[in-house]
Image (spheres, helix red, strand yellow):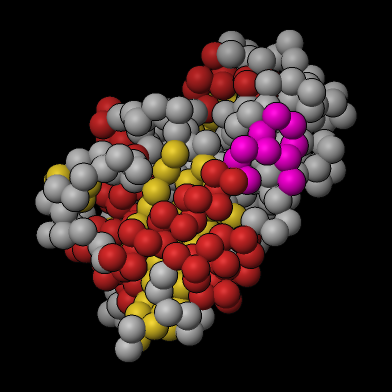
Amino acid sequence: MKTFEYIRPATIAEAIAAAAHPGASYLAAGTNIVDLMKGNVLRPGRLVDVTRLPGLDSIDHLDDGAVRIGALVSNADLAYDTEFARRFPSVAEALLSGASAQLRNAATVGGNLLQRTRCAYFYDPASACNKRSPGAGCDAHGGENRQHAILGWSEACIATQPSDFCVPLAALGAIVEIEGANGRREVPLEALHRLPEQSPERDTVLEPGELIVAVRLPAEAAAFAPHARYLKVRDRTSYAFAIVSAAAHLRMDGGRIAEARIALGGVAHKPWRAFEAEAALAGATPGRDAYTRAAEAALAAARPSGDNAFKIELARRIIVRALALAAAGTPDRMPALPASPFAISTGASVHV
């Protein structure tokens, strides 16, 4: 591991100033960046430890009905917050499907948003990877790529964004609050992550030194709570990254779908908001025909990036299944196997 400077600032302003230094990275729980440093994938010259910054570790239910989640709130604390899980059940389900209890207890909301791809070529310093070394090439093209992108990829990079948490957040219109040298700004979660194009080394729109301080879910997102599900297909029904996942939310009115919110995970360099599928469902009668039309619309632009054409059909089927589960209603209790297609309807009392 490369020798690095370690700084523990006392304020957000001090953290931003320290992280603006070339080669600096923020450190919170370290569940991703420390592994990358050990493998010489990332070699920061300075680590700015933000774990002791004040005011970033609370879940605040605001007067206007929105909820504001500090960037240092742990994944476990958010998933098991009773009021949060009741109002945003798909987000809680995604969090509980994403990692073991030990990791959920340590990992933070802000860190979850910024975790790096799990592409094996990115993790292997001996492989060519434009994300790790711009201009080096991409060994994933023509390599082992069954889990790589089917939407929005480029010749420079076919990696996918691995977060479960981000998928329902994107569907529900979450807002990311960011502090930087030029003050505070807000970015929709759906716009936080970038497509690779010719600069895959840039995962997000964050500028050097900028710090995520909170994520905010608007009050209207809670209207989907009665019909909200997150579904995730992985190589094993355990704490594995998604091959394909889907967050489906419906707002019903008089037996019809008044509004739908859908996003996909495991298919692109960012959580993929399926706007075309949402439009296809507006005013539709719930049923397999409507769900199939929505799935076709969501995947109309999909194309294989290698040996992964199966993911296109898998994504269609996951959308149909997730919509059917959402239409049937959010279960009163969190499934015993959160987000699994094999889940039974009884489990933890998180939604109660």
Residue 259 x, y percent position in the rendering: 45, 79
Snapshot quadrant of residue 129: top right
Q: Main secondary structure of the magenta part?
A: loop
The reply, left or right, for residue 82 in relation to residue 338 is left
Q: Which of 20 and 229 is in front in this view?
A: 229
Q: In which quarter of the image is the N terminus?
A: top right
Tell me which residue sits at (41%, 62%) in the image: 323
Snapshot quadrant of residue 134: top right
Is 155 above or below relative to 181?
A: above
**Residue 184 magenta-drawn?**
no
Q: Nearer the viewer, residue 276 or 156?
A: 276
Q: Nearer the viewer, residue 269 or 114?
A: 269
Tell me which residue sits at (63%, 46%) in the image: 312
Is 215 above or below relative to 49?
A: below
Residue 35 x, y percent position in the rendering: 51, 20
Residue 326 in view, yes or no: yes
Residue farthest along the right direction in this orientation: 135
Q: In which quarter of the image is the C terminus?
A: bottom left
Residue 70 x, y percent position in the rendering: 37, 55
The boundaries of the magenta stretch are 303-312
Residue 104 x, y percent position in the rendering: 31, 36
Residue farthest along the bottom direction in this orientation: 254
Is 101 above or below relative to 93?
A: above
